[in-house]
Each structure stands twice: as structure tokens, then as C-alpha cells.
Amino acid sequence: MTAPRAELLSINTATVRKQWSLPEIIAGCARHGIRMISPWRDQVAATGLKEAAQRVRDAGLGLSGYCRGGMFPALDRAGRQAAIDDNKRAVDEALVLAAPCLVLVVGGLPRSEDGRTVSKDLAGAREMVRDGLGELLEYARPAGMPLAIEPLHPMYAADRACVNTLAQANALCDELAPDGRAGLGVAVDVYHVWWDPDLKAGIERAGAADRLFAYHLCDWLVPTTDLLNDRGMMGDGVIDLKLIRSWMEAAGYRGMHEVEIFSAVNWWKRDPDEVLLTCQKRHADCT
Amino acid sequence: MTAPRAELLSINTATVRKQWSLPEIIAGCARHGIRMISPWRDQVAATGLKEAAQRVRDAGLGLSGYCRGGMFPALDRAGRQAAIDDNKRAVDEALVLAAPCLVLVVGGLPRSEDGRTVSKDLAGAREMVRDGLGELLEYARPAGMPLAIEPLHPMYAADRACVNTLAQANALCDELAPDGRAGLGVAVDVYHVWWDPDLKAGIERAGAADRLFAYHLCDWLVPTTDLLNDRGMMGDGVIDLKLIRSWMEAAGYRGMHEVEIFSAVNWWKRDPDEVLLTCQKRHADCT
């Protein structure tokens, strides 16, 4: 494998969110010659939507995605409608930011008002996800904003996303919008899918349907000390990142390589300039 | 669903391993009218194999399984042979203990001598597992000791087991010993497989091949604070245990319900008599 082109590197802004505000991240990426970012809604809201879009443009940056919509399941119809409404606002924001897609973390089991997970109906939650996706697609497709379903690791099935394999995401796309050009596709995050014995087949299937919308990088550490915030820098873990990139490229993916690292114990504690430099070096050497 | 019969309850000895030695667990289960246990090799070794077998018999108990063999992948041939040799000893011990099966946690990526995970070749590790299983089966089958492959949650793919779905375990059985009566089957642990959208189909397929050898119970807590030792008591989490039992029974499973709870923050800190009483109550009410 040849090294990936440096200009394909994108920084998901969560990677340095503890150190820098969104304007600082935009400036930092521009300073390091990183041309793409993927910001989160809370950061954009804190900056102001128009202000954020303007700063991205002024810095000469582009987006590899917008994080995130989803969270469709809810205990009652009002809750599900509120989720749809919020997702429509996320679509609108993504359009202002000129994002190539809105990334969707679809949600897990429905929760009560005080935040407790009170349902055990996983199949029901998956139906709510399908219905919510279908409804959101009716809004996003004519608006011209592609939706990228991100399968999350099975350890998040209860509380974050009940779509846990690429096979599930592909099946949802097959049902709702079989051709990716119709605005529904997938985001492949190595952290969530690296373990899957059917990963190569899933990537091939998604590529054949033109629905590989995003590719996210980090690494799986051994041991992993926290279910949420102990993701590794590329090269520090056990994921065969070159192999998975070869599968993505063989399936036709030519998009960005978005680095997304949640790391309370390590990278969020470091000098953010060092983090960006490390992302660049590891992107070149390890992915 | 009617409540499960109380006599189907088995206690995996890990559930109270911090509080009690194996002789104490045997005595405690007998005192509470629990008729089945599933002991671990280290506990049996600490007690002495013959002594452990004698105490089980004297207490009028039986085994629902023996924990555990597996850990097949290794960096070199000598390491893989050492694993096979150790697994053969586990088979011998299981025979002395009159266990109905040896449970296999198949191992993850190979490690260096100092314990670091140094390989990223997940497909290679899975081939080592297949080869190791095939070789062990040649020893276990004529000896009359069934082997139960336990798919582990994908969060353990790197360091504990690279068989992460029931579909994978079924495929291994299909390849090596398609009929469960030939001595190769699966252990279904709800903690590891509850999230799987293909779980029902996997249980049906395993049942049709007479390879449902074991059924393990606990619960998935939200939030889960530790990847290893934060399993929940049945009823305290989000797994639909009655639904999964209905699938097991519809697939022909008539065996034990083995409670296996690793819980550093809760159940390992409690009075073990209270833990056993809670297992009995929750088995009746929540599974």
C-alpha cells in the first residue's frame, strides 16, 4: 500500500474538543495545512451557525461531514416527532455549512424523561430507527443533504445506536433508498466495525451501491479502559488500518479520512498542536 | 411465558468467586437448593481435581459446564501447541468432573511473551481458532467430552475471543462437526449476543443442528462502567431475557440456565448467600 494522500486527512473536531473551541480548531487546522474538518452541532451552536460557516470558508477549509443527527427512538410519538424535528434542523445546519453529509448515530433503546433506559424492545427500537430515517429522508433528499448512517460498536446498542453492523446499515439503505445517489448511505468508522467478520463484504456491498459517504479513523487499544473515551491514535492499537483502507478503495471510496478520537486519558490532555501533528504523521504512516 | 423451573438454575462459580472458595461455593449452593454449578479451572486447581469432583458428588450437585478451554491463537507453532496441550488437560479435567461440556473462549489476537497484543491479523487469528478447534476435537470427541464454542461480545475481539457472533460459531461448527451430536456446539451467553440482530436466526440454526450446549445469564447495565467486570444481575439491565429464553426453548434447548456475573463494583462485594438468593429470585422473576 502506498501512503494515503495528505490532503485526504480530515479532523473530526471531537479530537481536540477539550482543548480548543471551534474557531480555535478551524484556525489550528488551517495553520497545520489540514484542509478538512467535521464539526459537532454543540460546537457550531456555541460559535453561531453563520459565524462557524464563515470561519470555515475564510480559513479555506471544507467539511468531510457534520456530526450529528439521529437518536430516533423515543417512548412516545411526541418524542419521536421531536427527534425528527431536531434532525431537520441538523439538515438545515449541514446545508449552511456545506457539509457533504449529515452523520447519523441512530439511537438506542428509548429512555424515560429522567434519562433512564426503560425499554428492552431492541427490535422495536430498530423499527423506530427505520421509520425515523424514512421520514427524515423525505426532508433531506429534496434539500440535497445526504444522510450517512454510522453503525456503532455493539457495546453501544443500548444507549447510543441499535444499528451495530454494516450489514444492518446496508439493509436499511436497501429498504429506504437502494442507490446512494438518492441520498442515503453509510459512514464506516473503523472503531465500530473492525471486529466484524463480514466487514469486507459489507464495504463491497456499500461501494457497489454508491453509498460509502464517510470513513472515520482511530484505533482500538488493548486494553481499552473506558467504553466511551479511550479511543487510540492510529498505530497505537490493533486495527489493521491499511487493510481496511484497501477495502474502502477497492470498493470505490475516494473521500476523506476523518480522524475522530475520544480520549479522556490521553489525547484530550495534550497540547492540541501536538495532537494535530500526530494525526498527520500517523495518517501518513499507519493508515 | 411461564417462569423457568427452579431446578434449571446453575451458578457459574465466577459469580461469587471473590467471596468464596470452590468448596464454599459447593456447600453454599447445596444449602440454597441450587443443584448445578459451572466451576473454573483455577478454582478446581486450587481445590485439587479429585477433591473438587468428590465434593461436587457428595453435595449432590452436577455441572452445567466447565470453564474454560480455548485461547488457541499464538505467535508461533510452539505457542499454539502449548494451547492445544493445555486444552487437552482441560478436557481430561472436565471428564473427571463429569461436566456435560467444556466451554471454549477461543482467544483473540496473538500476544508476545510479555503479554502485549502484537498482531493485527484478525483473519489469521480466526484461522488459528478453526485449526485449534479441529485438533482439539480429535481428542475430545473420542473421549466423550463435548466442546461448546462461546461467542464473546465484539468488545473482546482483540484480547479474549475473535469469535464474536453466533453466526461465526455456527459456521465453525458447520465446517468442523455439522451435527452437535459429534461433540461440537455453542454456548449462548446473553451478555455477548443480546445486541445481535441475527440472534434469533442463529439460535434456530444452532438448535436445528443439536448444538445448543449451554445458556448463560446475566444482564447488560446502562451505563456499563467497565468492559470486563460490570455485568448486571438479571432484571437490572436491558436484555429481554424472557424473549431470548423463548427463542432457546423454541429451538429445542432444554438444558440449564447458568448465571455468570462478573461484578467488581456490586455483586462481588455482597454477602454471597444474598447473591445466591438473588440469583434464585431473579431467575424465577426476570428470565
Image (cartoon, coloured by chain):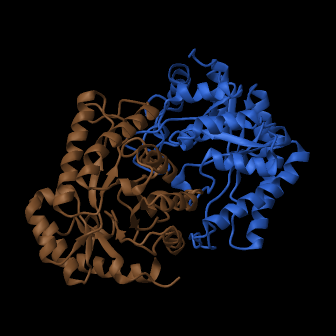
Chain colours: A blue, B brown
The x, y position of residue B110, in whole percent, is 34, 34
Does residue A134 lie above or below B235 as drawn? Answer: above
Numbered-mark total: 0
- Residue at figure coordinates x 49%, y 35% from the top left: A219
**Can residue A24 be seen?**
no
> For this view, does B213 lie left or right of residue B59?
right
Residue B80 is left or right of residue A166, and the answer is left
**What residue appears at the point 35 percent right and 41 percent down from the top-left corner?**
B134
Q: Position of residue A223 (x, y in %)?
A: 37, 43
Residue A227, percent from left and from top: 47, 51
Q: Quadrant of the C terminus of chain A?
A: top right
Residue B170's x, y, as percent? Answer: 48, 51
**Residue drawn at (78%, 36%) of the image:** A100
Residue positioned 41% across, 41% down in the render: B158
Relative to A259, say whether B269 is above or below.
below
| Figure quadrant of residue B180 | bottom left
| Foreground pick, A217 / B184 | B184
Q: Is residue A166 visible?
A: yes
Q: Residue furthest right?
A: A142
Left or right: B272 as drawn, with respect to A26: left
Instruction: Give the quarter of the figure containing the N terminus of chain A.
Output: top right
Above-or-below relation of A63 to A118:
above
Rendering quarter of residue A181: top right
Q: Which residue is the extreme one toward the top?
A: A2
Relative height, residue A75 to residue B201 (above, below)? below
Q: Nearer the viewer, residue A170 or B101?
A: B101
